[in-house]
Image (cartoon, rainbow, N blue to C red):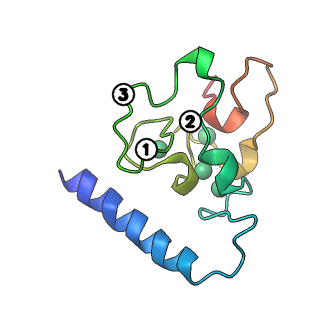
Amino acid sequence: MKKLLLSIATVMLFTTLTACSSDNQERDTDRDGIPDRVEQQHSNASTGKHDSSNDTITGYPDTDQDGIPDYLDRDSDNDGISDRDETAADDNNNGIPNYRDPN
Ligand SMILES: [Ca+2]
Ligand SMILES: [Ca+2]
Ligand SMILES: [Ca+2]
Ligand SMILES: [Ca+2]
């Protein structure tokens, strides 16, 4: 429950911060270099790996299921490497962008 409240607080904080931003075109709330519009989309649906429980409070993908959606999570796959360093490229061509692919 604490975790959920923390997540809600985080989302509210970011929502407030982004509301002050005038750049709605290429918003990057967590400033990891990957636009929100990319992180808010589910990856290749056929993998079925992302947000399979669909229980995130925002409905956005939460790859590591820590309660923080990818677009607010600086390490979306929780492999210890920041999204900024991993980027949205797909080095191993498995249909999952690097920032969501802990392998
Ligand atoms: Ca981002
Ligand atoms: Ca997460
Ligand atoms: Ca992220
Ligand atoms: Ca990562």
The answer to whether the beta carbon of the residue marked 2 is less than 8 Å from any atom of ligand 4 is: yes
Position in image of residue 34 (x %, y %) = 72, 52
Three-letter residue code for mark 2: Asp
Looking at the image, do the residues carrying marks 1 and 2 touch, with CB atoms under 8 Å apart?
A: no
The residue where tag 3 is placed is 53
Considering depth in this image, is 70 or 79 the residue closer to the camera?
70
Q: Residues within 10 Å of mark 1 (few under 14, many from 20)?
A: few
Three-letter residue code for mark 1: Gly
Residue drawn at 41 percent across, 50 percent down: 58
Q: Quadrant of residue 100?
A: top right
Secondary structure beneath disc 1? loop
Left or right: 86 with respect to 2? right
Position in image of residue 82 (x %, y %) = 64, 48
The residue where tag 2 is placed is 79
The mark total stands at 3
Q: Is residue 35 above or below residue 10?
A: above
